[in-house]
Image (cartoon, helix red, strand yellow):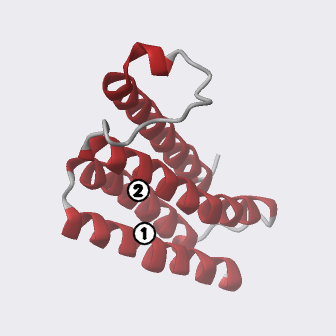
Amino acid sequence: MTIELWSLLSVTAILWIAILVQQLQLDITGGAKYALSNREQGYSFKEATALTGRLARNVRNHVEGLALFAPLVLTAAIANISNTWTQSAAIAFSVTRGLHFFFYAAGITPFRSFAWGIGFFLALGSFVFGLITG
């Protein structure tokens, strides 16, 4: 398995952890009644904490990032392209997604934004460059 595919697997694992942490926090703030319901009545965010909101936005942001990263990695795998650009970009994207998750959950805004920017602009851009030149 290529480094790019390993990176895709690691980013997916980070998303799984983010969803798990978000759900656990929602269970704590929403209570067992809400957690075990069919959730037709929605969730009152008046009861939500700042952490609950950050975790929900973090998951949504991570899904958006994965929606861009996964097709690039799968295109590289199908085209049998793996070079320094794609490998470095995949590693950088994985690392920045992990840092973004941590910084977002902790509410550390400047570093969260910095990690996001590096991952989305530098890493994904480099990956596209590696695909084109590969």
Q: Quadrant of residue 64?
A: bottom right
Question: What is the number of the mark on residue 119?
Answer: 1
**Disc 1 and disc 2 in contact, CB within 8 angstroms:** yes
| Sequence-first disc among 1 and 2 | 2
At a point 52% along the width and 72% down the height, the residue shown is: 84
Please tell me how crowded label 2 is: few (under 14), some (14-19), or many (20+) other residues with Cα within 10 Å.
many
Q: Position of residue 112 (x, y in %)?
A: 28, 63
At a point 53% along the width and 73% down the height, the residue shown is: 124
Q: Nearer the viewer, residue 4 or 15?
A: 15
Q: Quadrant of residue 1?
A: top right
Q: Position of residue 9 (x, y in %)?
A: 57, 44
At a point 71% along the width and 65% down the height, the residue shown is: 76
Looking at the image, is 30 positioned above or below residue 111? above
Q: Position of residue 2 (x, y in %)?
A: 62, 52
Please tell me how crowded label 1 is: few (under 14), some (14-19), or many (20+) other residues with Cα within 10 Å.
many
Amino acid type for the residue under numbered disc 2: Arg
- Assign a secondary structure to mark 1: helix
Q: Is residue 86 left or right of residue 97?
A: right
At a point 46% along the width and 35% down the height, the residue shown is: 43
Q: Which residue is mark 2?
A: 97
Q: Nearer the viewer, residue 17 or 25?
A: 25
Amino acid type for the residue under numbered disc 1: Gly
Looking at the image, is 117 positioned above or below residue 10? below
Q: Position of residue 52 (x, y in %)?
A: 33, 41
